[in-house]
Image (cartoon, rainbow, N blue to C red):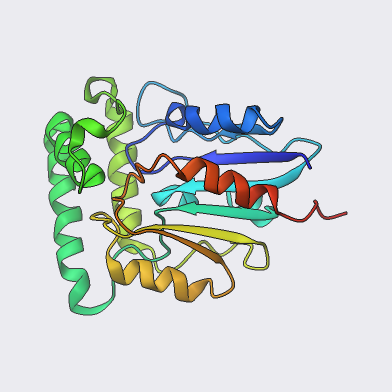
């Protein structure tokens, strides 16, 4: 079966970080197109679907909220990697998250992107050391326009209440959860599981938000290979 995959990165990331996935998919004859938010020097881009193949959206973290809503609505399968619907939990548990978002925005207001990225990457990598992460978006590559996009998306994170309205809830979904995630609150992860009761769930119990698990790509590929054919 042929697949066409639309991959979207998360906050402070960029399209090129999908390269290991693109190579794994290409080895099976699947085409992967990557969306780009444009935090760095790249031009923002949202590729469309091709003519053939099962339409799969793959999103990392906030990425599912950055995919074009019409494209998301027409997806026939979805893979969520350390993702969420609502980012800030309701009630008292959300207070800390809101303070963290406000503090991150203050770094951006000061133009201190390097310090913000350094602190953020530590949390993304945890419980592993930060040097286990692949190279990230260089702080010096973030323009004033990129800073504004980062700020806009921090605001959006604080406002999210659920999955996007066009999320194809009837489609097969693989929800990959990081058991040691320090970015996505446990209550946000729980809410996502409850919002997708029929989804397949893959828990990487010892992984952090970056999902630095060598077995992840093969497991996701196996799940994709078992999908039913595209709709007529």
Res 162 quadrant in image: bottom left
Left or right placement of residue 38 versus residue 50 in this view: left
Q: Residue at x 17, y 47 (%)?
A: 104
Res 170 quadrant in image: bottom right
Which quadrant: the N terminus?
A: top right
Camera-side residue of 27 and 74: 27
Q: Residue at x 64, y 27 (%)?
A: 27
Q: Is residue 44 visible?
A: no
Camera-side residue of 35 and 230: 230
Which quadrant: the C terminus?
A: bottom right
Q: Residue furthest right?
A: 232
Question: Is 4 rendered above or below residue 136?
Answer: below
Left or right placement of residue 4 versus residue 102 in this view: right
Q: Residue furthest bottom?
A: 91
Q: Residue 134 location in percent, x, y?
A: 31, 29
Q: Residue at x 80, y 52 (%)?
A: 229
Question: Is 193 rendered above or below residue 171?
Answer: below
Q: Residue 111 location in percent, x, y?
A: 15, 31
Camera-side residue of 228 and 106: 228
Left or right placement of residue 73 versus residue 217 in this view: right
Q: Residue 101 location in percent, x, y?
A: 20, 54
Q: Residue 63 location in percent, x, y?
A: 45, 47
Q: Residue at x 54, y 75 (%)?
A: 197
Q: Is residue 205 visible?
A: yes
Q: How many marks?
A: 0
């Amino acid at each position: 079966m042929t697949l066409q995959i639309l991959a979207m990165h998360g906050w402070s990331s960029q399209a090129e970080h999908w390269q290991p996935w693109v190579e794994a998919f290409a080895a099976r004859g699947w085409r992967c197109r990557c969306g780009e938010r444009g935090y760095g020097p790249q031009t923002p881009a949202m590729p469309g679907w091709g003519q053939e193949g099962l339409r799969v959206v793959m999103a990392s973290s906030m990425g599912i909220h950055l995919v074009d809503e019409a494209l998301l609505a027409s997806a026939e399968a979805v893979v969520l990697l350390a993702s969420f619907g609502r980012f800030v939990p309701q009630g008292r548990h959300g207070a800390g998250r809101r303070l963290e978002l406000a503090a991150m925005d203050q770094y951006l207001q000061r133009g201190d992107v390097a310090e913000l990225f350094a602190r953020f990457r530590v949390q993304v990598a945890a419980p592993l050391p930060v040097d286990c992460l692949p190279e990230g978006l260089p702080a010096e590559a973030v323009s004033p326009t990129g800073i504004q996009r980062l700020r806009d998306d921090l605001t959006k994170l604080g406002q999210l209440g659920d999955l996007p309205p066009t999320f194809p809830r009837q489609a097969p979904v693989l929800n990959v959860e990081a058991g040691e995630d320090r970015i996505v609150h446990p209550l946000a992860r729980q809410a996502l599981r409850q919002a997708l009761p029929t989804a397949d769930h893959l828990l990487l119990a010892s992984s952090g938000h970056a999902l630095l698990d060598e077995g992840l790509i093969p497991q996701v590929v196996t799940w994709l290979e078992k999908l039913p054919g595209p709709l007529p």
